[in-house]
Image: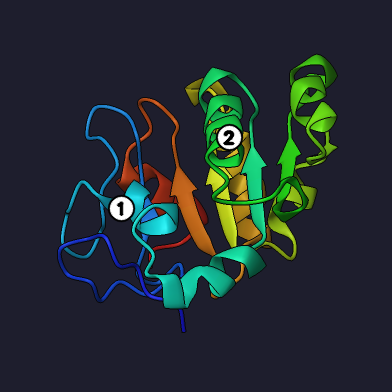
Amino acid sequence: MLRATGCQCALTEFNTSAIIATLGGLGVFCCTCRSSSLAGCFFQNVPPSRNDMIEELRIGLVGCGNMGGGLVAGILDRGNATPAQFTVVDVREAALDPLARLGVRTSQQTRDAVADQDIVILGVKPQSAPEVLALVGRLLQPSQVLVSIMAGVSTARIEKAVGSP
């Protein structure tokens, strides 16, 4: 089982019962130890013996705005993942075009970024959160990691909508 290696507790397992992260007023953090280095746990601080696991991760992104699109582009630019590992969805086809040109799978259907993914990243605007969270909550499996980069949407609100870990 893949474990986060960058957080202070170093015991956080990659599953929804252990992790929900949020980026907003609180920043990105590990829900187990409240470390602010969880983002690094995913891709930057993985020991060489775990690189093969990173290469196998399937990552879905719901919302391809400035933050979501920038996150995926940055991960790809650093070589931490390949375009084939990502499925990115957005209601705006134009927002998907830059990532599609990089070889990322794109869709306008939220379920495509949740079904069969190891990590699901939520990057929608706060006003879209209730509808997206309701759908993601129905689709999310216990083995999946849920990460939020939604500004202004608390972890408590996410837990209430998708189910508490």
Within 10 Å of disc 2 (Cα), the crowding (few <14, some 14-19, many 20+) is: few
Q: Position of residue 100 (x, y in %)?
A: 82, 31
Q: Is residue 33 above or below residue 25?
A: below
Q: Residue furthest bottom?
A: 1
Within 10 Å of disc 1 (Cα), the crowding (few <14, some 14-19, many 20+) is: many
| Disc number for residue 77 | 2
Q: Does residue 12 appear to the left or right of 72 in the view shown?
A: left
Which of the 4 image quarters holds residue 106? top right
Q: Position of residue 21 (x, y in %)?
A: 36, 49
Q: Which residue is at 42% across, 47% downward?
A: 158
In this rendered view, identify the residue nearer to me: 137 or 85: 85
Lower position in the chain sequence, tag 2 or tag 1: 1
Kind of residue at badge 2: Asp
Which of the 4 image quarters holds residue 70? top right
**Residue under label 1:** 38
Marker count (numbered): 2
Distance of label 2 from label 1 (alpha carbons): 20 Å
| Disc number for residue 100 | none
Q: Position of residue 12 (x, y in %)?
A: 30, 71
Q: At numbered mark 1, what does the secondary structure look like: helix, strand or loop?
A: helix
Q: Which residue is at 46% across, 74% downward?
A: 50
In this rendered view, identify the residue nearer to me: 84 or 131: 84
Q: Which residue is at 84% across, 21% downward?
A: 93
Q: Does residue 74 appear to the left or right of 87 in the view shown?
A: left
Kind of residue at badge 1: Leu
Q: Which residue is at 58% across, 53% downward?
A: 120
Q: At numbered mark 2, what does the secondary structure look like: helix, strand or loop?
A: helix
* Circles 2 and 1: CB atoms closer than 8 Å: no
Q: Is residue 107 above or below residue 70?
A: below
Viewport quadrant of the C terminus: bottom left
Q: Position of residue 19 (x, y in %)?
A: 36, 62
